[in-house]
Amino acid sequence: MSIELLGLTLGNETISLKEPSSMVITRAWDSPAWQLDITLPHEGPLDDLTKIQVKHGTDALFAGLCDEIVRSVDGNGAFVSISARTPGALLCDNEALPKTYTDLTAQAYFNAELKTLGFTGLSLPNTTASAATFQLGKGHSVWEAFCILCFRLYGREPHITAGNTVVVETLTGDDPIIISNAVNETGVLRYCSLEYITRRSSPLSTIVYRDAGGAYSQLYNNPFGNEQQVRRNRYIIPAGEYTGNPALDAYRRVMKGQLGLHSARVTVPGLHNIAPGQAIYLKSTISGNRLMAAYQVKIIYTESGCLTRLVLADPAYTPELTVDPAHPAITYQPRRQSRRKQAEPALFRRRRNGLRPMLRLAGADGGRQAEGLRPNAQISRLVTKCNNYAELGAAGAFGSGEAEGKNGKNGAKNPEISAFLQPGREKMTQNRQNA
């Protein structure tokens, strides 16, 4: 299987390189830059190599910028190892200008930032959508900034095609490649290994955002209804880029968690020029018949042969707008504050005022709580009542009060209280016997 390598020097000289001894090309749906790692026999200088192109027949497998060149020599001869990335690397390597934008469209930001780095093609579902305020903080790459903006405007992130066109779209199920080992099927890709993974540690059930007052009160629930019965919450401080609409940030986090729920790893023999986003119809006994999409494609070339390894994702969980960005599906939950105030108002008032919690002591008055009294005053009042009832001989009345208010048992729990109540108990017992 022949691989053709072409290099471009600083002087714009095109040179032919030898066939590689090993090569790995990595393509990912969530990365603007495809990666090339290649080793080939080579003698002499190669320091001025700036670009490299890989072709297989009529297929252009890779064209990008050289990041690192390592020359080595051992008993087998002289070699050069090259690491390179597609031009999308420029979007990752350049920092975006921290700035607050008004009425910003994706097209305007593309023209101001991405075009200057060599990108000319842009495909958008709606060119008129704009962000009234877009507060871009420091530390974002140009690509990260554009991804956040597109997600705010369209509920989905951009991707770069093999022709370096930036598109805003989702994984689709159009024209799928069938992967199957069924003996009665033809025109399909055969696999030599397959793993189907269900990762229950990936989905999130709830995202709670902090509000302007510092309380975590803005709640976003997983729109898929937590079908896997997972309980996994996150408490988030809203990013400045999502000011005014934290629901989209919450939605993005939830969707990324859902994307990891179902996946597959498939290895097929041979070299297959599959682009990320390609629909894959997977048929096997362990996965069933399932429509998936290529999330990562890794082409592995060695002198002994080629393999193509695929990571497949469930296209149902790719970020697709299900909420209106102008009306986010986020609710205000003042639950922690209100429950605290409604559940035990007297207790919290006493704690706030530096008083001890009230003792729930009751006597002949049928269990009435002496709210607002200090414990000592409460005990004195109760002891007086006990003695009064005992002296009046009201054995029946006091007995019912004891049963209802449990003053005898409560007093036994505290020696100090028990000492105060003991005379009343003795008199009460005597009255019962006399009755």
Image: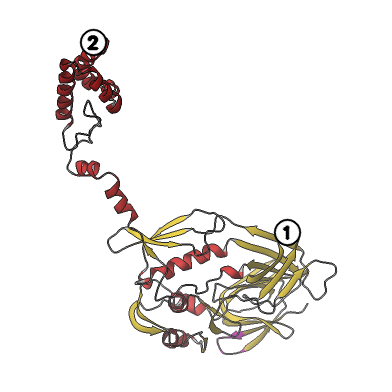
Total of numbered circles in the picture? 2
Look at the image and name its color scheme: secondary structure
Which kind of residue does numbered mark 1 sit on? Ile
Q: Kindly identify the residue that appears in the image at 69 percent across and 72 percent down.
A: 280
Quarter of the image for residue 297 reads: bottom right
Q: Which mark is residue 286?
A: 1
Within-10-Å neighbours for mark 2: few <14, some 14–19, many 20+: some
In the depicted view, which residue is nearer to us: 384 or 108?
Answer: 384
Q: Kindly identify the residue that appears in the image at 23 percent across and 17 percent down.
A: 395
Q: Which residue is mark 2?
A: 430
For the N terminus, the quadrant is bottom right
Residue 89 shown left or right of residue 74 in the figure: left
Q: Which mark is residue 354?
A: none
In the depicted view, which residue is nearer to us: 358 or 431?
Answer: 431
Which kind of residue does numbered mark 2 sit on? Gln
For the C terminus, the quadrant is top left
Vertically, is 121 above or below 360? below
Q: Position of residue 426 (x, y in %)?
A: 23, 12
Q: Magenta stretch: dominant SS?
A: loop
Residue 325 shown left or right of residue 63 in the figure: left
Question: Is 167 one of the magenta-colored residues?
Answer: no
Vertically, is 296 above or below 361? below
> Magenta segment range?
8-13
In the depicted view, which residue is nearer to us: 435 or 399?
Answer: 435
Q: Position of residue 98 (x, y in %)?
A: 35, 76
